[in-house]
Image (spheres, coloured by chain):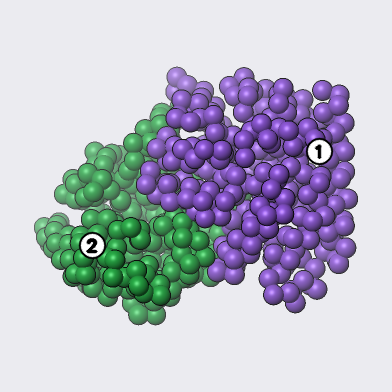
Chain colours: A green, B purple
Amino acid sequence: MTTQELVAQIKAKQSFLCIGLDVDLDKIPVSLLLEDDPIFAFNKAIIDATHHLCVAYKPNTAFYEAYGLKGWQSLQRTIAYLNETYPEIFTIADAKRGDIGNTSTMYAKAFFEDLEFDSVTVAPYMGKDSVEPFLAFKDKHTILLALTSNQGAFDFQTQALQQKAELYKTVLETSKTWENSEHLMYVVGATKAEFFKDIRAIVPDSFLLVPGVGAQGGNLQDVCKYGLNSQVGLLINSSRGVIYASNEDDFAEKAKDKAEELQQQMAEILQNN
Amino acid sequence: MTTQELVAQIKAKQSFLCIGLDVDLDKIPVSLLLEDDPIFAFNKAIIDATHHLCVAYKPNTAFYEAYGLKGWQSLQRTIAYLNETYPEIFTIADAKRGDIGNTSTMYAKAFFEDLEFDSVTVAPYMGKDSVEPFLAFKDKHTILLALTSNQGAFDFQTQALQQKAELYKTVLETSKTWENSEHLMYVVGATKAEFFKDIRAIVPDSFLLVPGVGAQGGNLQDVCKYGLNSQVGLLINSSRGVIYASNEDDFAEKAKDKAEELQQQMAEILQNN
């Protein structure tokens, strides 16, 4: 999917909501556990109920790998269902991969070719040659971890480098020089809305994937104030806040209500911007 | 597996060799492609031929994920075969994971509980709460990326921090303060043997997993000169150099020869140390 197609979808739906599909079997309605593939059954119900209110879905691969082969199969079924049924949706494999060159190429093949995701999240620690293999894929997007939403972000990411800016800013600056860097997006945690101003000074045009609105304490208005650009340029993720709005049989309906609430707030922001 | 058991194995075998099981279907003997599970068939032959010469195997998950569900199944079969047949072997899931707390717990479950690996490689970029969930597992080991063997290591890892040491040294220093840090090992690339002296000053007792000897240009003697400690404290990895020593039907025998060559060099180093 091209960035233009993503932007067109955002404008049509008046939403820049991304829903995180982080399925934990301990948290879904017990009635689903009787299904042949409870994780896929849960995802399908959530997707069918919310696809018109969001522009992206983001399964975090950890939640699938934890269930082994069956989990990987559920992930495969989920992305296949999305691509077949709602091809307009932007799909994100939240995998946080990154390795030396030839190995990153294998990861890129896994997520872009085998599973056919539109994008994948990648960790920057190993530098240029660990990221460029992902960037080489046309019409695919690499979402680089810049400033994450957890407490540990302060361990290294916000540390200042000698004669350079903080590590996360140096990651942003440096990544702009990599080949095919126009395929880059960035993960920026919403718990630090005040940082968005500095980030926009470095990457004014890039899309930012923002976790941590809602459950993790980030504020949508604050993020939008500093983070929106002329092409919207934001994907706001909510995982638990939407998909676990209820753990009864009405879970899909309640997830829809929650997604609708967020979409309405986004529509209002877009209209006033 | 405890560190003591690993050290005992090293001393008994006079080897600190780790063999990387990075299987690429384009590089294995064509005769294996007729097998039901060519990747597992290849791994099993390599393992049966080399298990007495090495102390660890390290499948890189990228090479399995690239083949989708079938690849994940091959990984599962490989680790199950290792645990059943050669339980004395130290197993490393080279997965380079790392995510916010509850998500890292899911990855830890995937590799430590579902697949039953002894250890997993983890990226440090997201800090303390992204690594501690792995460290919480008793008799399991977390191998943190410190200084990697690729060119991109110079993008961020070797950059000096203000009022602190270079990023990779700060990662080493900081990680020592994390809960259960006695379960930590570190990835240190062998292409930078001169750095081992500084690293040993920070983590004198930890095991270091060293990729990049052989194909990537690192020198075994140089690494040992600065890297060995009283408990050996090194695992030297070779992947392509061993497993692709031949791509004919004698591949397992040739892999054994190559592994034996490395083991002999290691035995000599251990005897002279």
Relative image position of residue A143 (x, y in whole percent): 42, 54
Q: Which chain carries label 2?
A: A
Q: Is mark 1 on a helix, strand or loop?
A: helix
Write down the residue under mark 2. Answer: A247
Q: Quadrant of the N terminus of chain A?
A: bottom left
Distance CA(mark 1)–CA(mark 2): 54 Å
Image point 52% across, 58% down: which residue? A134
Q: Is residue B59 depicted above or below B213 in this figure?
A: below
- Any part of residue B219 in sight: no
What residue sits right under mark 1 in the picture?
B13
Q: In this view, does B260 lie to the left or right of A95?
A: right
- Residue type, mark 2 in image: Asn
Residue at 41% x, 57% y: name it: A63
Q: Residue A50, image x and y in percent?
A: 24, 70
- Who's the residue at 28% across and 73% down the image? A45
Q: Which of B99 and A249 is in front in this view?
A: A249
Q: Mark 1 lies on which chain?
A: B
Q: In this view, does B37 lie to the left or right of A151?
A: right
Q: Is residue B26 left or right of residue A133?
A: right
Amino acid type at circle 1 is Lys
Which residue appears at 78% of the width and 61% of the height?
B45
